[in-house]
Amino acid sequence: MNRKFLTTLILILPFQLLADIGSLDSEQGNIYPVKNTSVSMSREYVYIKLFQDSVTVDATFWMYNKDSTQHGIVGFPDFSKLSYKLKEITDFRVSIDSSNVIPDTMFIEKDFLRFKKEFKWYAWEVVFHAKDTTLIQVSYTGFWGSAGLDPFKWFGYFLGTAKTWNGPIGEGTIVFDYTNYFSNRYISKCRWQKVSTDPDSLMGFLPVEDDRDMEVTTEENTQTYQFKNYSPRENESVIIEFLNPYDYHWYWYLWDDRYLEDYFNCHLYTKNDVYFILAELYARRGFIFNSPRETDYFEKRIWYKPNENFTPDKFSKGEKVFIEMLKIVGQNMTLSK
């Protein structure tokens, strides 16, 4: 029986997870990961735009086949069935070597990335030509899941599936663009964890250590990960975590200003940093500032749109709770500046 390689595109998922393409094998309806010994991922470029209610993805993969021509199937799973609160992805588009293709759909019950669900798959045929590079491009819109149990949200890019290709990832770039959501002051560099290895130690915010061979560049509107000849671990992910005041959850009432102050202290934030986190919430709602300092700062932001009709009623419930905590922290925090 002839087998076809099934290449899995798992990019941005509605519940804050996305992943690299991976190689799978298919036989009599059973799907499972398999090592592709001839096709390698010579390059990948993924551009992810984050919005308050959705995300858009444009991803390009350069796949090089060093051996004879292979006929296969490329698949993309829609993970919206993982939760009743998630919406299906929309505007799904795919092209091979710049030619648009129309995918079919199929449903497969299979353990995948530690999930056991029946997934809807977009599937289309692909040919990996001998001694040649195949360009695969995918774009679509995904939607966030429900709010978390605290004012944080995370978005992950799963690299582990790239291990199924021949050799390391030749060159990779992953860009998170949060221009229309928040600024880099909202990005979390600390995590809530035990302050020592002692099992009875207290919890607190500590800096996240990352010793991977990646170049990470954080700018006001983007965070970029770049790497070369990279061999990811099986369960490895690139994660961006950030303060998210726009959603609301009842668990917020268990927070207090001391918890948030500890978070800011871990980041070595000054009172000025905290003030501009607060001011940004107002600016994104169109608040018109009287102070020349704030006016000059926000008028240089491409997302700022002054609104003469601004009222506090425009804030969401989550924003209102977060603003009150920020005001208390700004008044009481013990930072040096």
Image: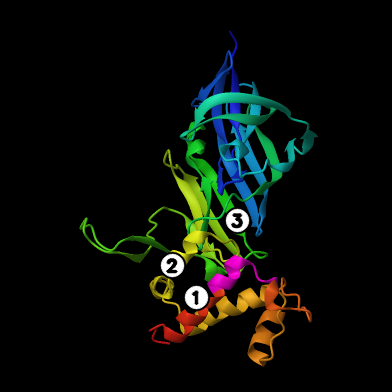
Kindly identify the residue that appears in the image at 53 percent across and 43 percent down: 170
- Distance from disc 1 to disc 2, alpha carbons, whole Å, reads 9 Å
Three-letter residue code for mark 2? Trp
Q: Position of residue 148 (x, y in %)?
A: 51, 55
Depicted 9 relative to depicted 268: above or below: above
Q: Is residue 11 left or right of residue 237?
A: right
Depicted 242 relative to depicted 281: above or below: above
Q: Which residue is mark 1?
A: 325
Residues drawn in magenta: 314-322
Three-letter residue code for mark 3? Val
Q: Which residue is mark 2?
A: 255
Lower sequence index among marks 2 and 3: 3
Q: Which residue is mark 3?
A: 175
Three-letter residue code for mark 1? Met
Q: Quick one: SS at disc 3? A: strand
Q: Position of residue 155 (x, y in %)?
A: 54, 53
Circles 1 and 2 in contact, beta carbons < 8 Å: yes
Circles 3 and 1 in contact, beta carbons < 8 Å: no
- Closer-to-camera residue (73/247): 247
- Distance from disc 3 to disc 1, alpha carbons, whole Å, reads 31 Å
Q: Position of residue 102 (x, y in %)?
A: 78, 31
Kindly identify the residue that appears in the image at 64 percent across and 52 percent down: 47
- Closer-to-camera residue (293/99): 293
Lower sequence index among marks 3 and 1: 3
Q: Residues within 10 Å of mark 3 (few under 14, many from 20)?
A: some
Q: Give the label on residue 236, or none.
A: none
- Closer-to-camera residue (215/309): 309
Q: Residues within 10 Å of mark 2 (few under 14, many from 20)?
A: few
- Distance from disc 2 to disc 3, alpha carbons, whole Å, reads 32 Å
Kindly identify the residue that appears in the image at 75 percent across and 39 percent down: 93
Kindly identify the residue that appears in the image at 66 percent across and 52 percent down: 55
- Closer-to-camera residue (329/311): 311
